[in-house]
Each structure stands twice: as structure tokens, then as C-alpha cells.
């Protein structure tokens, strides 16, 4: 989770990612941020996020993003 928080802080250092649950809904993260984050997640976690998984509920909080990463990693095994 710490690696994911580091990725997020590189996008917007002023956000409390531990508590925020509306990163997409509140427009904290925009489409460019998502593209950057997805590329960073691929590099750091070696996981590809399919287009059909790029929905607000998967990216509204650090916890939901990390759950998505874990689920995709489990699917690869």
C-alpha cells in the first residue's frame, strides 16, 4: 500500500490519500492523472489494468485502487 501512496503523492502531494474516498467523484484525479497512475502501477506492480476496470468505483480511494491491484494480481496466478 505504501508504494501506491507514493505513486498517488507524486500526482497530488496535498491530498490525504489515507482518508479520501472520492478521488474521482470530487475531481481530485483527472484523466491525465489516471493515465499516469495506471502506467506507474504497471511499472511498480507489474499489473495491467484492463479498460473495463477503469471505472470511478475502482479509483475513488487508495484502498479501492489497492484492492483492484490485488484482485488483478490474484487473477494472474
Image (spheres, grey):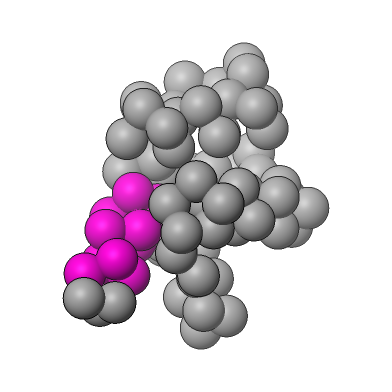
Q: Which residue is drawn at 35% across and 58% down?
A: 69
Q: Which residue is drawn at 34% across and 61% down?
A: 68
| Residue 73 is one of the magenta-drawn residues | yes
Tell me if residue 28 comes above or below residue 48 in the rendering.
above
For the C terminus, the image quarter is bottom left
For the N terminus, the image quarter is top left
Q: Which of 42 and 58 is in front in this view?
A: 42
Tell me if residue 20 comes above or below residue 49 in the rendering.
above
Q: Nearer the viewer, residue 42 or 27?
A: 42
State the predominant SS element of the stretch in magenta. Answer: helix
Q: Which residue is drawn at 44% across and 37% down?
A: 4
Q: Is residue 45 left or right of residue 30?
A: left
What is the x, y in percent for residue 26? 59, 43
What is the x, y in percent for residue 15? 56, 22
Instruction: Look at the image and tell me whether residue 29 can be seen.
Output: yes
Q: Which residue lies furthest to the right in this view?
A: 32
Tell me if residue 74 comes above or below residue 68 in the rendering.
below
| Residue 70 is one of the magenta-drawn residues | yes
Instruction: Look at the image and tell me whether residue 64 can be seen.
Output: no
Q: Is residue 47 left or right of residue 68?
A: right
Residue stretch in magenta = 64-74
What is the x, y in percent for residue 12? 66, 26
**Quadrant of res 10:** top right
**Quadrant of res 39:** bottom right
Q: Residue furthest bottom?
A: 52
Q: Residue at x 50, y 46 (%)?
A: 44
Q: Nearer the viewer, residue 1 or 28?
A: 1
What is the x, y in percent for residue 11? 68, 32
Amino acid at each position: 500500500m505504501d508504494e501506491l501512496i507514493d505513486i498517488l503523492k507524486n500526482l497530488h502531494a496535498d491530498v490525504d490519500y489515507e482518508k479520501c474516498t472520492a478521488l474521482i467523484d470530487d475531481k481530485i484525479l483527472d484523466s491525465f492523472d489516471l493515465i499516469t497512475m495506471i502506467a506507474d502501477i504497471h511499472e511498480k506492480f507489474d499489473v495491467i489494468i484492463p479498460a473495463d476496470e477503469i471505472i470511478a468505483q475502482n479509483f475513488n480511494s487508495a484502498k479501492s485502487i489497492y484492492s483492484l491491484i490485488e484482485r488483478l494480481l490474484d487473477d494472474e496466478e
